[in-house]
Image (cartoon, rainbow, N blue to C red):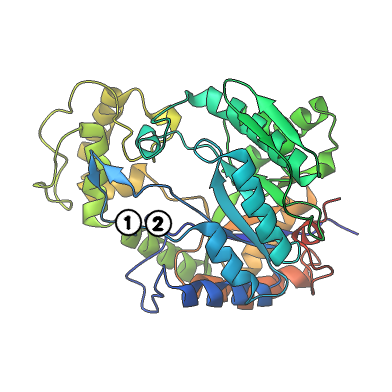
Amino acid sequence: MPHRLHLGVFFTGVGPQLLWTAPDFAEHTHIDTFIATAKTLERGLFDAFFLGEGLRVRENRGRVYDLDVAGRPDAITQLAALAAETERIGLVATQNTTYNFPADLARRLASLDLVSGGRAGWNIVTTDNAWTGENFRHGGWLPHERRYERAAQFVEAAKALWAGDRVERHTDLVGLSAAPTVPASPQGRPVLFQAGDSAGGRDLAARHADVVFSANTDYDKAVEYAADLRKRLAEYGRSPDSLRILPGASVVLGDTPAEAAEKAAWIQREQTTGPRAIAFLEQYWGKDLSGYDPDGPLPDIEPADGELDPSRGTIPIHLRTGKLERVAEWRRLSADRGLSIRDLVIEVNPRHNSFVGTPGDIADEWERYVRTRAVDGFNILPQELPGTIEDIVDKLVPELQERGIYRTGYEGHTLREHLDLS
């Protein structure tokens, strides 16, 4: 049987991804929205519904970033509610290893796995922004790579508890003495997802993850990433088929390629509102730019000295240096092409990799990805709710089924079964 495509949806709950201006806007923090979304995904035979989670509201230059949703309920609590409203779809909670405690989090995840009948997953994240740590006992602790050291020890302890072992760990990063308190679910333990793309993140995935939520959606990059990850799997004595690779991607569908392209351009512009464009530049200028017109030229003042202040915690590591050179390049680009602040931000800060086209065209493209094992599927980042999800389920899924690369019915009840994991 040919490899089949696996699909999940990543519901972030914050950020510019979800449009507040869409005509059929659904309230992003209301439980009815979560229930309706999960049920639609289950109708579309999706593997999993992912919830993002943040431990502190986002900030920009030391102030609450009020262009995002102000806060979200605890992910495990939300997913426990969804477990009662759904029957098959996997329920994946993003949970942090830097600021949680192993025995406590292992118990809560095992509880979700048990009450859902073996449908729970854990999206393992480490969080590198210091301001989140200010709400916890350790403050803004742990350099980048040491976060992955702690994560590896944390996950090892959780897996041992789920295996029924008493655990003793006493290192400079993890300390606990615990015994399991929750019986195993039908799938044994929660499925482990990991989203880091650095060397440390890839090693953590190769050692422990069942599924990787990567950023490598471009075909050539996806092939390169898959080869690297499978090489690392071999180094840890794991088979190439012991891990599923699901890049994050957005999907924009249209009845014609032109219609899809026009809709994609509209979405990107709606995501990059004037205040968001100003806030993006403020990260690089290190100054208050609220007096500038987002549809006017770039600021006529020079950026503050020093590199970026990552106070919002959303700037990738590789973009936190070389600030002045980047700003100079933006000035040249803006002058050459007559770009406003908002136009420039759209140009230099593209949203998550998108598949844009007709359902048939995207199905053809995805068939190539999955048959060559560049990926095992995709984790969809919707832009409109319920519109994006309904379009994928009603228009794209049938095309995938017609090509024989997508299930026509659930064949098991647990998330591990959906993912074809041993």
Crowding at dot 1, Cα within 10 Å, few <14 / some 14-19 / many 20+, comes out as some
Helix, strand or loop at mark 2: loop
Q: In the visual, does 237 lie left or right of 90?
A: right
- In this rendering, does residue 133 appear at all? yes
118 vs 122: above or below: below
Q: Are marks 2 and 1 in contact (CB under 8 Å)?
A: yes
Q: Amino acid at mark 2?
A: Val
Which badge, 2 or 1, is on the more N-terminal residue? 2
Q: Label 2, on which residue?
A: 14
Quadrant (top left/top right/bottom left/bottom right) for the N terminus? bottom right
Q: In the visual, does 364 lie left or right of 340?
A: right
Helix, strand or loop at mark 1: loop
Please state the horizontal and vertical placement of residue 155, each as a whole percent of the image: 67, 37
Please state the horizontal and vertical placement of residue 397, each as a whole percent of the image: 68, 71
- In this rendering, does residue 356 appear at all? no
Along the line of sight, which residue is nearer the eye, 55 or 252? Answer: 55
Q: Residue at x 40, y 79 (%)?
A: 24
Crowding at dot 2, Cα within 10 Å, few <14 / some 14-19 / many 20+, comes out as many
Please state the horizontal and vertical placement of residue 25, each as a whole percent of the image: 38, 75
Q: In the visual, does 184 lie left or right of 141?
A: right
Which quadrant holds residue 184? bottom right
Q: Label 1, on which residue?
A: 68
Please state the horizontal and vertical placement of residue 121, each as a whole percent of the image: 67, 54
